[in-house]
Each structure stands twice: as structure tokens, then as C-alpha cells.
Amino acid sequence: MTLGSFLRGFLPALKGSRGIFIATVVAGAVQLLSAAGATSVSGLIIGRAVTGQDPDLGRWGWLLAMCVLGAGLGTWWEMYVAHDLAYRVLAELRTALFRKLTRILPPRRRTGRSGDLVTTAVGDIEQLEWFFAHIAAQVLTVSIATLTGVIVLGVLVPWMIAVLLPAIVLILAVPWIVHRWAQRQAAQQREELGALGSDIVDVVDGMPDLIYANALDAALADVDEHTEALTRQRIRASIREGVEQALTTSIIASASVGSLLVVYLTHIDASLAPVIVGLSGATLAAPALLSTVLLQAGAIREAGERVLNIMNTPAETQEPSSEDAESLPSKSLPSVSAPCRSSSVGETRERMATSGLAALCLEHVHFSWDGVHPVLNDVCLEVAPGEILALTGASGRGKTTCIALAQRLYDPDDGVVRIFGVDVRRLPDVSLRQAVAVVPQEVQTFNGTIEDNLLLACPEATASEMRQALTAAGLEDFSLDREVGSRTQGLSGGQRTRLGVARALLVRPRVLLLDETSAHLDNATEELILSTVRRMASEGTAVMIVTHRPSTQAAADRVVEL
């Protein structure tokens, strides 16, 4: 990634925080100029005292105190506003990143590891804090302080410019000279970090299977291998940073010797000599500060490139614009602003059941995961309001793909998917999610209580409604305050499935999609769930069940084999 593309990608993020950005520049300039002033005034006091002149502490002491106070307050102010700016921008970037992820996940083609995505969504966003808190404003701050110092010294001792300008150029050139080295190391660290993250996720999620297969030691050995590789990469990065700092320090030391020679050869007033030497050091300290910050430039650029790659990834689906969006027929759905529960839903569904309009329709749908091998080829499928349709067929024939297309995780390569006659590509997300509920093969839970997990489906649900949903799903012995873990922790497969059914009941969808829901259920629980599904269908809900179980197929009005 070039510097220009990086700046074009991230500088616009500062537009909403212009005031804080300006305050950061001002605070940084106050801090650096006050520090330079303190150095100069203290040098003047020392110079006058050494040469036998009156140091005049009554005047210069007060000025020194003001400069020291300004440097201290400027440092605090700069740290405060710079990080306020950075974290505001990072919050916006993180929100934009996760909004983008809702449009590109799950991807049709898996090209990376889950650890890579976690590292980008968490670590890479945090890495950009260096850019917004320590680089973006400091470029201007350092420019102001350095230019001021060069002008003042040039007026006092013109020959100082011949020492300062080459030193400033060399100090700022050090990060540029080693930037390819730094960028390569950052990429290698990121690769190892992503591999380590994926290994850890695999070990944690697959712990029982690894133990049963006697493969846990081998998996942990992979974790150790990537840990050691990451450690070696970070040691090499530390060595490179040490080389950069040594070069910068050597340049400043050489410039300081040059400043002493200029003072000696120009025979300036001895009382001003400490002022000249001190001010030259303060002038060089500003670009040295920026050079130190730029030690992280390689890692920042790598992190920024990965974030922008996600932000620029073509979306699997696009929400329709306000001009292109369509509404579902009024008889099939309440308005978008209506709560997820409605006393008139049953009447609405009964009217829809007699309208003859399919609740879910796949018209001549073609779909391929890899762009080469078709999974669905000219598939036509309809589910009427109040109908239960069982979708069956051999593995790999596209049953789950039909579920994914109906909830619009993807758009078909050709053909149309309609909900109550409306192309799903023209439905706003909120309308589609209100109309269609899905119970997937693997229901995910999230850290929190049962109540927290149910409220994800319907934030307006009351405690009474949640208990009714749990009872209908066969979880009447679950209390709302029961704690559950994330992903698959704390509940069995059958319990997670029933929790997914309870979520769907709270939504009261017009179309219910069940993907192998009965696979983890015993016969009694399956019959309980099927009776709940039949009741929903009797109220007008269209139900499509992907299943291989004959008992589930027997409960359907129709069975379609792909």
C-alpha cells in the first residue's frame, strides 16, 4: 500500500472531528514550543551567570516558570485531546468495519482464516490508534516547532542552518530508509499472529474432538510453533527499532557537536552560547520525536491495508436505495415500525392464506459457490402461507443454499427470490428480517443470560412472552436469568436448537425456515417442536423445513426433493 492510498483511505475519517484535530495540533505546538522556550531561557540564565553577568532571575525566572508550566500543561492537553480524537475515530472505523462485515460474511469463497479476521477487527483497528493519536497531528506540530526553531536560530547564528537542515533531513529519512524492512517484518508478524489466533480458536472449539482423537498434543505443538515463530519475529523487530533509534541518536549527537563548533568558530557572545546549543537540541528533538513515532509506521501501514481491504471488499448483497426499495403487501406484514408482536397478526395471516400469493418463491434460481460448479440449477420452488414444505435430498444438493438465499445472505447468480411477490433484493433489511426467521443447523449462543439471547430476536418481548416461547420450544425448565456461554458453550446441541426455535417464536415471522432443526432432538422433543410449527402454520406462517428424517417429512404438507 502506498502512502497516498493510505492517507486517502483514513484521512477522511478525521472530517467529523476537525475541532479536536485542530486542538491536538495546537496542544502539541504549545508543548514543543514551551519546552524549547524553557531550554532557551534556562540556557540564557546559565550563560549570564557563568560569564559574571546578573542572571536577572526576577525577569527571566518568571519567564522560565511560564515556559515550564506551558510545557507541562501542553503535554497533558496534547495527550488528552490526541487520544480523545483517536478513540472517537477508531469507534467510527470499528462500527463501519462491522457494518461492512454484515455484507460480506459469510463469504462464498473462504480465502482466509478466522484468526485473520479476528486480528483485523480487533488488533488492526487498535494499531491505527498510533496513526490518529501520534502521527496525523504530530506531522503538523513537528513542522511548526521545527520551522520556528530553524528561523530563530537562523536569525541569531545564520551558520546554524547549515548544521540543522542536513540533520533534520537525515532524522526524518531514517524511517523512510528502513520502511520496507519494517513493513516486511510487520507483514510476517501479522501472518504468524493470524495463524496463532486460528490455532487457538481451533483448539478451544475442537477440544473434545482433539481429546477423543488423541490429537491434542499435536494441536498444542502447532500453537507452540507459531508462538515461537511470533516471538522470533518480534525480537527481530525490536532489533530493527534499536537500529533506527541508534541512527537517530547518532545524527542528533553529531548535530550537537556541529552546533558547538559553530558557536566556537563564530565567536558569539558567551552568554548566548548555552541558548544556541540548547535551542538547537530542542529544534532537533521535534523531528526526532516524529521519527520515534514513525518506528511503528510499517505495522500501521500493514494494519491499515488489511482494514481497507475489508472495507473495499465487494458486498455479497446491497441494501436497496430508498428509490428502489419496495414494501411487502400490507396484508402480509405490518409496518416496519410495528413491534415484533401484534394482536392482529393471526387475522392478517388468514387473509393472506386465501389470497393465493406465495409467501416464499424461488423462480428459476441458479447458484454456484465457486463460480464453476452449480449447486442450484433452474430451481423453482413455492411455499404458500400456512403451508409446511419439507425440503429433502442428498447432501450437497443445495437445500441449505435455498435457506441462505431466502434470508438473503447471498443473491442468486440468476433467477429471483420473492417474499410475498416482492424481489428480496428490493426489500429493506429491516423488512426482510421481520418477515423471515431462521433456525440454522448450528444455533449460536452469546455470553449472557437466556433472556439476553432471546431479546436479540425481539427487544420488545416481555418476560411473560419469553417464558411462553421457551415452553413452546420445550425449554420450560429454563429460567430467564440462566447464564450461557458464547458459541456452543453451556448448552447441548438440542438445547441450542430449541433456543433458536424460541427466538423464532418471539419474532412471529411470516416465513419460517428450519435447517435440519430436528437433527439434534429426541422423538418427544421433535414432536413438541413440530406441534409448535403446525400451530404457527395454522396461523398463516409459511414454513420450509430442510430435513432427512421421515418423521419430520410426515408432518409436512408437501415434500420436495432437490
Image (cartoon, grey):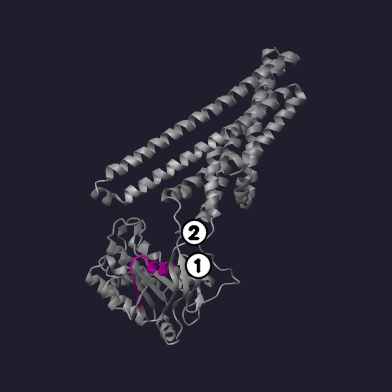
Task: Please identify the quarter of the rendering in which residue 159 is found.
Answer: top right
Magenta-colored span: 389-404
Q: Are marks 1 and 2 in contact (CB under 8 Å)?
A: no
Residue type at mark 2: give it. Answer: Ile
On-image quarter of the C terminus: bottom left
Sequence-wise, the earlier of marks 1 and 2 is 2
Point out residue 368 in the picture as x, y percentages from the top left corner: 46, 64
Q: Nearer the viewer, residue 211 or 62?
A: 211
Does the segment drawn in magenta span residue 401?
A: yes
Point out residue 172 in the picture as x, y percentages from the top left corner: 63, 31
Q: Is residue 140 above or below residue 255?
A: below
Give how far apart the Cα atoms at labels 1 and 2 are: 16 Å
Residue type at mark 1: give it. Answer: Asp
Does the segment drawn in magenta span residue 478?
A: no
Point out residue 396 in the picture as x, y percentages from the top left corner: 37, 65
Residue position marked by numbered label 2 in the rendering: 104
Task: Please identify the quarter of the rendering in which residue 135 is found.
Answer: top right
Point out residue 20 in the picture as x, y percentages from the top left corner: 62, 47
Tell me which residue sits at (47%, 65%) in the image.
410
On-image quarter of the N terminus: top right
Q: Nearer the viewer, mark 1 or mark 2?
A: 1
Task: State the count of labels.
Answer: 2
User: Alpha-carbon neighbours of circle 1 within 10 Å: few (<14), some, or many (≥20)?
Assistant: some
Question: Hey, which residue is sitting farthest bottom in the picture?
Answer: 354
Q: Is residue 36 above or below residue 382?
A: above
Q: Is residue 495 above or below residue 535?
A: above
Helix or strand or loop: what does disc 2 sit on? Answer: helix
Tell me which residue sits at (27%, 46%) in the image.
215
Q: Nearer the viewer, residue 190 or 534?
A: 190
- Say whether residue 163 is visible: yes
Residue position marked by numbered label 1 in the rendering: 413
Question: Hey, which residue is sitting farthest front in the picture?
Answer: 372
